[in-house]
Amino acid sequence: MYVLEEKIYFWLLLALPVVVLLFLFLLFWKKRTQKKFANSDLLKYLSPNRSTFKPVLKLIIILLAISSLVVALVNPKIGTKMETVKREGVDIVFAIDVSKSMEAEDIAPSRLEKSKQLVTQILNNLGSDRVGIIAYAGSAFPQLPITTDYAAAKMFLQSLNTDMISSQGTAISDALELATTYYDNEDQTNRVLFIISDGEDHEGNIEGIAEEAAEAGIKIITIGVGTEKGGPIPIKRNGIIQNYKKDNAGETVITKLNPETLQQIASEANGEYIPGNITAEVTDEVQEVLQNIEKTEFEAKQFADFESHFQWFLGLGLLLLFLDLFLLERSTAWIKKLNLFNERKKKED
């Protein structure tokens, strides 16, 4: 486990392209000035040992030195000691629809990206709760087991896409069934399942499974993403829209939000349905729901001690700057003696 203590210093990496541009400008200015002074043959005669590779090498060293010093300012820390702590919270599982209809852009930037934004904001407002992620389309599978590591949850969340499950559809019933076995503590009664979907083309007996989930102590909150007006499903290649999905008659398929299905699931499980178009409203409602749920104490392992490792990057940066001071732009004699490019033979010919 590692922690980046002062991430704000990463902005200093913007100096790297500036340094490269200054180097290119200086190179252009030198060549232009030298041409005014003498022709290329005379310049080679006046400075026979000048290296064309060394300036580039010096630039690379300076860029690496700046990068190392920036990382040193960020102060990366690595966990060195684990301890078991008692925390109070709720077990939360996010079941996220990754079917092709979630590519629709009737809500910007797309239904799936909007779903990721919503879950990210919910995670940002959590305290000591445990979270897990389920992805589903034509089938459901666990993406992230129950954990208190929110950074890992966000990483797995960003990896979700509509190509990760080959079987298409909206198997909400599979996600519900998987969720009932997802929680790792039999004594935990305060369990929450968030279903984020457009609710379209659902499959299976969702009412019966939602009722079973409620009997198992799982509170289901459904979040509808999309608009009832709907939109086409884009077919993309390398992030660029090539066409839109069409039906057997050649007509463009329009996918629409189906709030009735999501409302029915929430009703069967004594939960709530939340429209997901406005992020701030969703996070406020979710926070209110979670605050009204009794917290349960559980044990969790976490890193208690972190050791700073900025000194390694500071030392590397200073070493590279020191090396740059002694790296001259003229050719190195022993490398020149190796005659790597067979220059002497060319001159004799």
Image: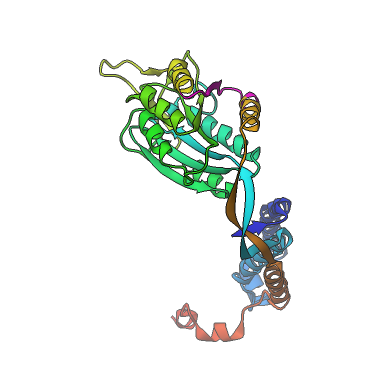
Q: On the rendered structure, is 133 left or right of 64?
A: left
Residue drawn at the location 64% of the way across and 31% of the way down = 287
Which quarter of the image is occupied by the N terminus? bottom right
Residue 274 falls within the magenta-colored stretch: yes
Residue sitting at the far front: 187
Q: On the rendered structure, is 339 left or right of 56?
A: left
Residue drawn at the location 54% of the way across and 22% of the way down = 272
In the rendered image, the vertical position of residue 329 relative to residue 258, given as above or below? below
Name the residue nearer the viewer: 189 or 322.
189
- Residue 267 at what x, y percent from top left? 48, 19
Which quarter of the image is occupied by the C terminus? bottom left
How many numbered tags mark residues here? Answer: 0
In the rendered image, the vertical position of residue 311 relative to residue 342, given as above or below? above
- Residue 121 at what x, y percent from top left? 62, 35
Image quarter of residue 304: bottom right
Residue drawn at the location 42% of the way across and 19% of the way down = 261
Can the viewer see residue 192 in this picture? Answer: yes
Residue sitting at the far top: 229
Residue 161 falls within the magenta-colored stretch: no
Can the viewer see residue 18 in this picture? Answer: no
Name the residue nearer the viewer: 20 or 37.
20
Q: Which residues are magenta?
A: 269-281
Residue drawn at the location 57% of the way across and 22% of the way down = 277
- Residue 77 at what x, y percent from top left? 67, 62
Name the residue nearer the viewer: 37 or 182.
182
